[in-house]
Amino acid sequence: MTTWLRNARLLDGSSTDVGLADGAVAVVGPAAAVPGDDVVDLTGYLLTPSFVEPHAHLDKALTVSRAHNLTGDLLGAIAVMSEIAGGFDHKDYVARAEAALRLHLAYGTTTIRTHVNVGGDFGMRALAALVEVRERWRGLLDLELVALVAHPIRGQAGRDLRQALAEGADVAGGCPHLDPEPTAAVRICLDIAGDFGVPTDLHTDETLNPSMLTLETMADYMLDTAYEHAVTASHCVSLGVQTPSVQRRVSEKVAAAGMSVVTLPQTNLYLQGREHPTATPRGLTAVHALRGAGVTLAAGGDNLRDAFHPVGRGDALEVGALLVTAGHLGVRDAIDSLTTGARAALGREPVSVAAGSPADLVAVRAADANDLLGAASPDRIVWKAGRQVSRTTVHTDYISPSPLEVSA
């Protein structure tokens, strides 16, 4: 049986029918429906590859009412989350993670990479819960787990990282810029990931301090060792405050190393720059220098209503709109960072509205790309591997204004 999506408008402005079968896009062209086929009328909708969340924290999601960040900055958020970590049990982790997944899925995200704190105050409790969630949601949404270890990495944290990878984490993670030995931390994380044959995704230079530039350390190490495994650098805030020449130099190294960068405008705009009451920096990475050098750039929501970012909908289009407003990206480039760029950063198979592509799609009520990102209508239909997994319908009733009286 084929599912036919009739009258779908695409990002290039064209309209077409799209047939889905066996988890893939089977045909793009006039529908040839037969009895038994499922037909969905997409008149008024724009059809695009579904969104990818390349950097979430599902273990912390939806805890803002429990954790008040007194300073409002990164270290304040880390401190308060550590204070309340002992109150999170398996059931709590699962319930909050699944509530967050439902939000993401309803808005059209079908692939999520989430960082999970392991070791220290957190132990392996969150990881065990998220492994369970990953398996339960398999087929509805792809969930990838990054083991986010504390520091110093030379001590127990390094052992925690190995344990987490052995117990079900998919990706090695950490925060080298917070380590007392940032350069060593980069190398140890990459070496451990190499031992397990898994990708690495590091919280990188989440600071406005221009002297902290472990992004370049990562690129140099990969180039010097001909490192073979996928590496993603998330945040990379300090690159945004470098001189143009430094931005170009580092971006070219990152491109040569084959690294991907994830920018996280929501959380970084919230946490960064509080020590600058005037001419406050935007706290974003150098998106234009990175794109100019050919680096794969993805954009993510990061934290969802917790001490690191107290608001947010779990909607990728909210992130994309911030990249236009605060990052000065064009609308199509911003959308690309939520779809094509994000999939590439995670090493996922490309998705497009073309025959043979995986049928991971979202239809949003919108007239064109500008309307898609600008209005971000919650009226959406979501398919995972050709199966409709979510539908949100919005209906609004208006009271009409009174007619004007026309004087004689």
Image: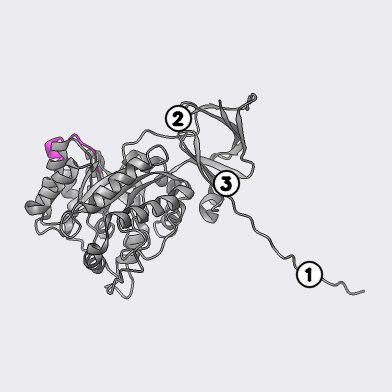
Mark 3 or mark 1, which is nearer the start of the sequence? 3
Q: Which residue is mark 3?
A: 368
User: In the image, residue 316 lies at what x, y percent?
Assistant: 43, 51
Q: Secondary structure at mark 2?
A: loop
Mark 3 surroundings within 10 Å by alpha-carbon count, few (fewer than 14), some (14 through 19), many (20 or more): many
- Along the viewing direction, whichever of 214 and 67 lies nearer the viewer: 67
The CA span between labels 1 and 3 is 32 Å
Query: In the image, which disc is placed on residue 65?
Result: none
Instruction: Name the residue rendered at 22%, 63% in the picture.
Output: 86
> Which quarter of the figure has residue 9?
top right
Q: Which residue is mark 2?
A: 357
> Which quarter of the figure has residue 121?
bottom left
Q: Which residue is mark 1?
A: 402
The three-letter amino acid code for the residue at tag 3 is Asp
Quadrant occupied by the N terminus: top right
The answer to whether mark 1 and mark 2 are in CB contact below 8 A is: no
Instruction: Name the residue rendered at 38%, 51% in the picture.
Output: 98
The three-letter amino acid code for the residue at tag 2 is Ser
Q: Which residues are magenta?
A: 222-231
Q: Is residue 292 visible?
A: no
Is residue 383 shown above or below 152?
above
